[in-house]
Amino acid sequence: MAKDVDLSSKEWRDIIFEGKNKEFGAYQLRAASDARHNRSMIVVVLFICAVFALSFIIDKLPKPEAKPEDTIEQTLAELATETEEQEEVEELQRVEEQQPEALPEEILNTMKVTEIAIVDDEEVTEEIKSQDELQETTTALGNTDFDQGTDDINVVREHKDEIIVEEKAPVEENQVFTAVEQMPQFPGGDAELLAYVNKNIKYPAMAQENGIQGQVVVQFVVTKDGSVGEVKVVRSKDPDLDKEAVRVVKTLPKFIPGKMNGQNVNVWFTLPIRFKLAGI
């Protein structure tokens, strides 16, 4: 008999809560359980339908087409063609640069062409040489007159250079350069310069007693005549070491002076001097 009873039915709830307070929360929960179950099922069904619909819409959307292999090959071929064209242009430029330079027309020989015209004597404006003047000249009759040009390519180039060469700007008298076309050079080169410094340097006694050693960077002006001008310390290590470095630099013999535009100029020269104690 109990198997035929629907536990969710209203009759079963009334039997359970017979004689009890039906306003109690458990009765209300059991009474509303059917509606909750129905709403839950509806929500689940709607969610499943939405998922299927979304999947269907995504499948129907146009997919981006993959780039075919022939398009990639075409792009590579275009790049190769552009590279070949660039190489051809560069080759043409090199050929044009290697072509012999054109000679200026005003320098080359030119031939004077005279037109023959029959006119009255009164209209003749060109000077007519006498028979005596013709006998004195060494030019054969009938020769074509040329101007004073030349076919010698070397002469043409020299003349052309004379035309385009500009005068170099004069260098200021007391200007000191940091870099020039030809830097000053110690007689014998850098090796002889270092040898001279090592030979003439005297380690200061105070710095030696205190174990001070290191590098002092000195900067000085090599003047137009090669002698040492202004001297300054640009990187100091110790006052005694600085003083000794400046003293040695001032004793340097004359350099081969620096040049700018073919003229001797004043140039700053930088010389690092290292002080090192023996056995350290």
Image (cartoon, helix red, strand yellow):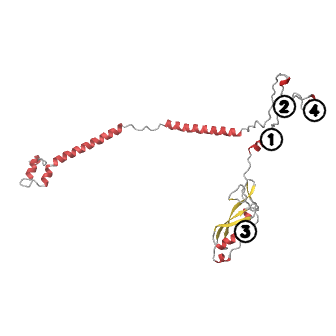
**Which residue is painted at 67% across and 68% down in the image?**
274
> Which of the two marks, 2 or 4, is nearer to us in this view?
4
Is disc 2 surrounded by few (<14), some (14 to 19) or many (20+) residues within 10 Å?
A: few
How many numbered circles are shown?
Answer: 4
Residue 240 location (% of width, % of height): 66, 74
Q: Nearer the viewer, residue 172 or 160?
A: 172
Closer-to-camera residue (82/261) = 261
Q: Earlier in the sequence, mark 4 or mark 1?
A: 4
Q: Earlier in the sequence, mark 3 or mark 1?
A: 1
Work out whether 264 lies above or below 60. Answer: below
Can you identify the residue that label 4 sits on?
136
> Which residue bears the numbered disc 2?
145
260 w.r.t. 37: above or below: below
> Would residue 264 be visible to someone looking at this image?
yes
* 84 sits left or right of 24 in the view: right
- 239 shown above or below 7: below
Above or below residue 78? Residue 194 is below
Tell me which numbered mark, 4 or 3, is placed earlier along the sequence: 4
CA gap, disc 4 and disc 3: 76 Å
CA–CA distance in space, label 3 to label 1: 51 Å
Rendered-image quadrant of the C terminus: bottom right
Q: Callout 1 environment at 10 Å: few (<14), some (14 to 19), or many (20+)? A: some
Identify the mark at residue 155; answer none if there is no mark: 1
Q: Find residue 250 and name its label.
A: 3
Residue 63: image x %, image y %?
Answer: 40, 38
24 sits to left or right of 224: left
Quadrant in the picture for residue 259: bottom right
* Lower sequence index among marks 2 and 3: 2
Q: In front: mark 2 or mark 3?
A: 2
Quadrant in which residue 158 is drawn: top right
